Amino acid sequence: MINFDLEEDHLAVETMVRDFAAKEVAPHIQENDSKKHFDRSILQKMAKLNLLGICVPESYGGAGMDYVSLGLACEELEYVDTSLRVLMSVHVGLNCLSLLSWGSDDQKERYLVPQAKGEKIATYGLTEPNAGSDAVGIQTTAVKKGDRYLLNGEKHWISLAEVADNFLVIAWTDLEKKKNRDHSGLSAFIVERGYDGFESGAMTHKWGIKAGNTGWFSLTDVEVSEDNLLGNEGEGFKIAMFALDQGRYTVAAGATGLIRACLDASVGWANERHTFGQAIGQHQLVKQMIANMARDYECSRLLWLKAGVLKNEGRRNTKETSLAKWVSTVASERAGSDAVQIFGSYGYSDEYPVGRFWRNSKGAVIYEGTREIHTLMQADYALGYRVDKPTRVSLPKYEKS
């Protein structure tokens, strides 16, 4: 039989992160959101719980937990606020797991270990002013000069742009292939904030995830040693897509937590609020919205858990992770909208959290592959136009110590 019960280790992670979010985040999140304030003190608190290296092996400074534990942490964090799940997505999912799988021993020692311990914070740089889903549309270049590369370009909509110490940057190393949009001309680099020619700034005009730091960074003749080339030249696109497999997984788990937050808030309100002489939970159309949330939560949780099990087994999971990300994020947007509707005029006020849930939900149907991109991916899988092939590097199989 298939056992759907969480193991004791997983239950412990779920409880730990749930308690942490309730005590350390929930009391301050409304104020931080309204002031567009990222609370940097939360980083060291998360590091003390080993969350910033949760599924990185202990030999590289992490907690040595599995990928399901990572998903559970993301679900519980986003249940309270999306900004902390975003932190996990870029630091752990997009950056640390890419270094774990593609990095040299030297790169793991210099970058992965301090990142897993929370001594350094890391993020990921692919998106540019004129390139998001169209990865080969980026303009950033890395021209080799001796044993170094000169990087030039600008990245936009980068989570933790003003907070991160280390950046995983995708750039063109073959300019002829750039002209032909041949993605085998892309490469990946580890860039440190302190390098000459590196600048960053905040993007304050966003209307969702306001308690998170989002911004841009620019590279002007930034010199990067060839020792900081991740993988080989020409493997940047593969690394970028590999990173997205991990980031999308955390987004899916987080969106599932957001659905549950909308459901719990809506159930409480539907039992408390009365109209026409009865609790609004007795009204058929309110029941329909709540039933949709309950359905979407269960479906989304099963999908991300399946992807997590595949990751634990070291198996390719691009299709399953894409499906989980697509289904859960679209469902979370619907749950946020319905939660505001159930709360009525109160939902339109910051007095209650459902408005924040709805605003935060919108980003996830755009970043790390829009809902349209994932729709096309799933159609291509079903039609047989897309078949995943084994990759040179896969996520390390989880071995319980």
Image (spheres, rainbow, N blue to C red):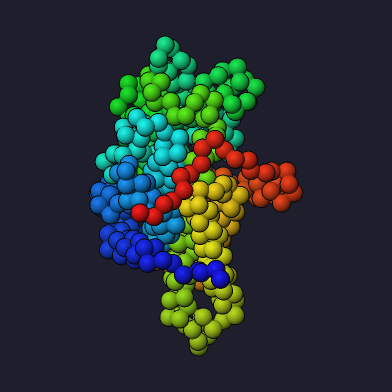
Query: Which image quarter is the C terminus in?
Result: bottom left
Q: Is residue 254 left or right of residue 319?
A: left
Q: Is residue 174 visible?
A: yes
Quarter of the figure with residue 192:
top left
Q: How many marks?
A: 0
For the point 44% across and 67% down, the residue is 6
Residue located 54% across and 48% down the image:
315
User: Looking at the image, is 90 positioned above or below residue 361?
Assistant: above
For the residue pair 76 and 100, the one nearer the viewer reads as 100
Place of residue 364 in the rendered image (x, y in percent of width and height, measured from the top left): 51, 51
* Front position in the image: 221 or 284: 221
Q: Which residue is the extreme one toward the bottom? A: 277
Q: At x 53% / y 53%, what residue is drawn?
A: 310
Q: Position of residue 368 (x, y in %)?
A: 52, 44
Residue 222 visible in the snapshot: no
Question: Does residue 348 appear to the left or right of 65 in the view shown?
Answer: right
At 36% from the left edge and 46% from the top edge, which residue is drawn? 57
Pick the quarter of the image with the N terminus: bottom right
Q: Quadrant of residue 98?
A: top left
Residue at the limit of the structure toward the top, as seen here: 146
Give the image location of residue 347, x and y in percent: 46, 66
**From the viewer's perspective, is 77 left or right of 232?**
left
Compared with 302, 372 (above or below) is above
Corner quadrant of residue 218: top left
Foreground: 316 or 266?
A: 316
Residue 208's x, y, as percent?
Answer: 44, 51
